[in-house]
Image (cartoon, helix red, strand yellow):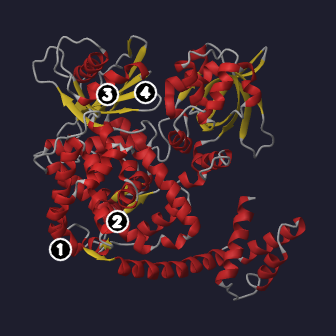
Amino acid sequence: MNYSLEEYYDDNFTTGNIETPSLSLLNFIEQTSTELLESGIIEGIEIYQYMTEKGSRKPKRVDGYWLNEDGVLDLFVVDYHFSETLQSIANSELKKLHARLINFIEYSFNDVNSEDELEEEQLYSLINKSTGNISKVNCYILTNRKLGNNVAALPNETIGEITINCSIWDVSRFYRQSISSSQKEPLNISLTDIFEQGILCLPAHTGSNSLQSYLAVIPGNVLAQLYGLYGTRLLEQNVRCFLQARGNVNKGIKTTILENPEMFFAYNNGITATAKNIEVRKTESGLEITNIQDLQIVNGGQTTASLFHTAKKEKASLDDVYVQMKLSIVEDKLSSTIVPKISEYANTQNKVNAADFFSNHPFHIRIEEFSRRIYIPLKSGEIRETKWFYERARGQYNDAVSKLTIGEAKRFRDEHPKRQMFTKTDLAKYVNVWEEDPLYVNNGAQKNFTQFAKRIGSLWKISSDEFNEVYYKNLIAKAIIFKSTEGIVSSEEWYGGYRANIVAYSIACLSEFCKKNNKAFNFEMIWEKQSINLKLTKCLKIISAYINEKLMSPPPQFKNVTEWAKKSLCWQVIQEEIEQAEREFSPYLLGLLIDDVEERDIKSDAKKVQKVDNSIALQKKVIDFGVDKWKALAQKALSEGRLSEKEMEIISKTVLVKNKIPTPKQSEILSRVIDRYESA
């Protein structure tokens, strides 16, 4: 069965109640921006809605923004059409939305304005102060309608030296992106169109079974311009995380560019990249790459960004700078497994273990296994059991539906409601607001996930048994609290924006209250009910109102609420001045807590159960490997000297003996042998 556009629309974009259009619009913005974020199209979004009154001389509108460290400003405007059936959007409507965004940009970039309608607007202030550092503006029009037949591409514009690109994301484009599974929208780069020349290369692959690989030398100007055009879309997801975590331009790279550009090739390790396909041509100088489909830099993101920033900020010439590149061609069906491994092995010099960022890390695999196996308790009046669905790799949910018949797809959706689907970045938010500084959550999904991955990677090495069924059920309870808090905040009379910041700080305050009182939250209660009760609802209403007040009254030096929410001083002020709010909400909250000693006992018991489960899983893995495979492995490894005496002895006395089951310790050793064998 093909998962149709209409079914996709029904599943994803009839998101709200027509009687509450503002909440529907907010849900739509969050859902579509999550898709763009997971796809690597954008790095983040701050929801910020501004619209001039009707009849304004030059109407302006913006619904969200993001300003990254490279000086790239993303602005979003949203068209959410309240309909239960898929509708079309006309060219004239798109032009109006585009014009309002351009009017906002022009006004914000202008130092002297004749009107003062925007001067107190926080986003205007942020853009106006950052004008000198902004290198590019991307305008995104997001709509839950499909493009009409007469729609033409919107023109790119310039303001001074700044390029303004515009892209339209209608429901058809979101659908195409969604059914592409774990792949993001590919970059098709025509080097000859952009630079009027290709890149000389040498084939570096041998044998019919090896990946196509090429060695090339890229002029520094070309690499910097590509980064200027496509930004972090060039960087494979894990490299993007590393780049954001480090932030500043590498001083060594910068020094070489400025002082010894001719030595850059000798001093720098170069970049490692992948592509789906390339086009080459023979020239008098040799083989030349003319077109690259979906170029992804899996190692060398810091080099790439440093070239761009040094050329831009220091006005440095890159004429004498050349960078070596190792390029591997990876076809679609192999990309989800091969590209992460290339990235992981290429990034082994980093202090942070690259594997922590991958969807195939054992932590993510275990959470996925729990979500596919564990049914949630039935709510009162319900007769059908359901599960939460963890989308370990982007697109898993829609990919699963697309392979089913109509009847099977309906049963799948009934068992896994879309509202109970969550992603890796969602998971990181749900956990970090309880266990980490809320500032990570307020700094955007990617940075928050980077911090989450660091911590989970370290904890997994210490004791993977911590991540058990109780951990999973607590995680789902945290998801329910998070989503419920979003709903509470959106429905409050005082709400005027910044929901993500308010929610993060509100739940963090719950966590801090538990710690101060040597208590733990009773997540089991939330798991059993699959909802929050009236007491917790009342508690969250009080806390969120307090947080809103603190965010909306920043110190004079912080004019922008979003920037204020990202400062450690903000969290410090919230904690220092929360006593009055605590007196109000503590009577509702105390009944929802358990002693921390009781919590430790629950976790200890869960670890013991998980340890047994892990042992059984290893024994099953060893037995399922099969006697024939063990014989072949033993013979090959013995002839090549790849097995230790202890390993050979365990194999001969267990798996090669009929009806013999290895002990948990033996299974652990044999499991590592299997991993080595399969890796080789």
What is the CA distance from the residue labelled 2 to the residue labelled 1? Answer: 21 Å
Q: Nearer the viewer, residue 558 or 387?
A: 558
Image quarter for residue 510?
bottom left
Element type where label 3 sits in the image? helix
Disc on the earlier residue, 2 or 4: 4
To which residue does mark 3 refer?
126
Residue sitting at the far front: 576
Disc on the earlier residue, 3 or 4: 4
Q: Which numbered tag is attached to residue 381?
A: 1
Instruction: Give amino acid for label 4.
Output: Val
For the residue carrying disc 2, how many other residues have a C-alpha within 10 Å: few (<14), some (14-19), or many (20+)? many
What is the CA distance from the residue labelled 4 to the residue labelled 1? Answer: 51 Å
What is the CA distance from the residue labelled 3 to the residue labelled 1? Answer: 51 Å
Disc on the earlier residue, 4 or 1: 4
Element type where label 1 sits in the image? loop
Disc on the earlier residue, 2 or 3: 3
To which residue does mark 4 refer?
72
In the image, taking residue 37 as reference, residue 615 lies left or right, namely right
Tell me if label 2 and label 4 are in contact, CB under 8 Å.
Answer: no
